[in-house]
């Protein structure tokens, strides 16, 4: 497989189709190609947690992180999502890129922790942030990810939850490490968003619990 440079990876991910009709109750926000590329490239080249590994993408949506991982040589990428519409877009994306090493599973992600303990090498995800009607969903995803991963979990979260996540990491006896801080523009996705886009501060951190945190997108008036 060709070794992709960062700009090549980002260029490829810009061709990934996104949500056609995002669902607010599921907090369906796109993972921007720039953010996905930077995150995956760092995980791959710095920590060697993608190539030939079994990757789980929890709340995979339309497949941005799974597809990027597959492009970087993952042995198998498994996308988990509750939304059939998102998985349909994901499947089209995978077929468009002719990526055979991807499987899709429609399920409630939070029900997986007891069913799939230590079944994957790495979890890479952009979970619901737990805003609006989904309070605590980010931590539920994180707990599930930690149960499933043998090696590491890489995830994106709100900056405002950093102390809370650190506290939970201590309780769970896992190591949390901030790996990078990034900024990106999250476009308006729902009718109640008053701005065309908002700039988000992101960082992702490391059983190695590798997690990422962001400011709260569209939490109030966006």
Image (spheres, grey):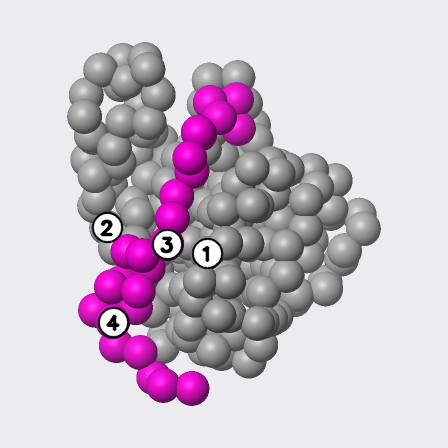
Q: CA distance from mark 4 to mark 2?
A: 19 Å
Q: CA distance from mark 3 to mark 2?
A: 21 Å
Which sits in the foreground, 128 or 147?
Answer: 128
Which marked residue is nearer to the observer: mark 1 or mark 4?
1
Residue underneath mark 3: 16
- Tag nearer the camera, 3 or 2: 3
Q: Which mark is residue 143?
A: none
Sequence order check: which comes first, mark 2 or mark 1? 1
Front residue of 187/149: it is 187
| Disc 2/disc 1 C-alpha distance (Å) | 26 Å
Considering the numbered disc 4 on the image, is that residue within a helix, a strand or a loop? Answer: helix
What's the magenta region? 1-26
Query: Residue 195 in the image: x percent, y percent?
Result: 19, 21
Are the two marked residues, 1 and 3, in contact with CB atoms closer than 8 angstroms?
Answer: yes
Mark toward the start of the polypeptide (1 vs 4):
4
Which residue is under mark 1?
93
Q: Secondary structure at mark 2?
A: strand
Q: Quick one: SS at disc 3?
A: loop
The local crowd at label 3, few if under 14, some if 14 to 19, many if 20 or more residues have their Cα within 10 Å, is: many
Earlier residue among tags 3 and 2: 3
Q: Which residue is mark 4?
A: 8
Residue 210 visible (yes or no): no
Q: Position of residue 30 (x, y in %)?
A: 37, 41
Q: Earlier in the sequence, mark 4 or mark 3?
A: 4
């Amino acid at each position: 497989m060709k070794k992709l440079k960062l700009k090549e990876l980002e260029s490829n991910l810009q061709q990934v189709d996104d949500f056609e009709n995002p669902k607010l109750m599921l907090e369906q926000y796109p993972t921007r190609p720039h953010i996905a590329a930077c995150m995956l490239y760092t995980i791959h080249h710095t920590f060697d947690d993608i190539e030939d590994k079994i990757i789980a993408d929890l709340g995979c949506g339309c497949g941005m992180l799974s597809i990027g991982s597959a492009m970087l040589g993952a042995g198998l990428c498994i996308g988990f999502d509750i939304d059939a519409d998102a998985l349909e877009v994901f499947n089209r994306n995978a077929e468009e890129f002719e990526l055979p090493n991807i499987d899709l599973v429609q399920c409630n992600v939070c029900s997986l922790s007891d069913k799939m303990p230590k079944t994957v090498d790495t979890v890479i995800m952009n979970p619901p942030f737990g805003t609006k009607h989904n309070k605590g969903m980010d931590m539920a995803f994180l707990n599930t990810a930690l149960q499933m991963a043998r090696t590491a979990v890489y995830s994106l979260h709100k900056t405002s939850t950093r102390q809370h996540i650190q506290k939970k990491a201590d309780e769970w006896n896992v190591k949390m490490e901030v790996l990078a801080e990034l900024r990106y523009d999250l476009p308006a996705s729902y009718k109640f968003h008053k701005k065309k886009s908002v700039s988000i501060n992101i960082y992702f951190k490391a059983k190695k619990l590798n997690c990422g945190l962001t400011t709260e997108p569209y939490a109030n008036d966006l």
